[in-house]
Image (cartoon, grey):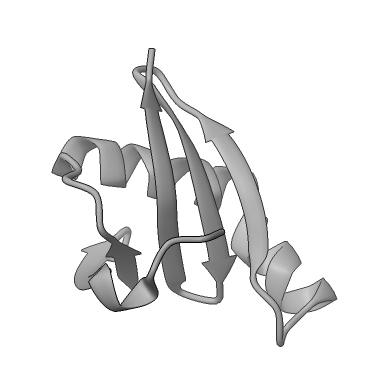
Amino acid sequence: MSKNLDDFDIYPIIHNNKFYNIISDLDLELKEVRELLDYIEEHGIMELQMKEHPDMAAICEIELSKAKFIVDVMNYEILIYKREGK
C-alpha cells in the first residue's frame, strides 16, 4: 500500500474481552469496527496469521453488510487501509 503510515492513528478497543489496536486514517463508525472484528474472530484470521506467519501481517479483503475493507491483521493489531461503501 502506498499510504503514509505517519498519518494513521491508533485506536485501542476491547472487543469480546480481547484488546485490539485499530490503526487507520479513516473515519470509521464503532459499529463497523465491531462488525469487522467479529468477522476476523469468526473466520479465525488472527489465529491463522499467528500460526502460519507470526512475523508477517496477513492482508485481507473483507466484505461486510455496508462496506468492503482492505486490512492487515497482525496479532491484535488491525491496520485498516481502505473502505469502500456499497
**Residue 44 seen:** no
Q: Quadrant of residue 64?
A: top left
Furthest-bottom residue in this view:
55
Q: In which quarter of the image is residue 74?
A: bottom right
Quarter containing the C terminus: top left
Residue 62 in the image, given as x and y percentages of width and height:
55, 36
Quarter containing the N terminus: bottom right
Please, is residue 20 above or below residue 80 in the view?
A: below
Residue 25 in the image, given as x and y percentages of width and height:
25, 58
Q: Please state if 7 lies on the left or on the right of 46 as rendered.
A: left
Residue at (43% x, 63% y) in the render:
79
Residue 26 in the image, given as x and y percentages of width and height:
24, 49
Please, is residue 85 above or below residue 51 in the view?
A: above
Residue at (65% x, 56% y) in the render:
59
Residue 5 in the image, given as x and y percentages of width and height:
37, 73
Q: Please state if 23 lies on the left or on the right of 45 as rendered.
A: left
Please, is residue 10 above or below residue 71 in the view?
A: below
Residue at (71% x, 87% y) in the render:
55
Furthest-top residue in this view:
86
Residue at (46% x, 74% y) in the render:
76
Q: Please state if 76 lies on the left or on the right of 52 as rendered.
A: left
15, 60: nearer the viewer: 60
33, 86: nearer the viewer: 86
**Residue 4 seen:** yes
Please, is residue 61 above or below residue 60 in the view?
A: above
Q: Please state if 32 lies on the left or on the right of 43 as rendered.
A: left
Number of disc labels: 0
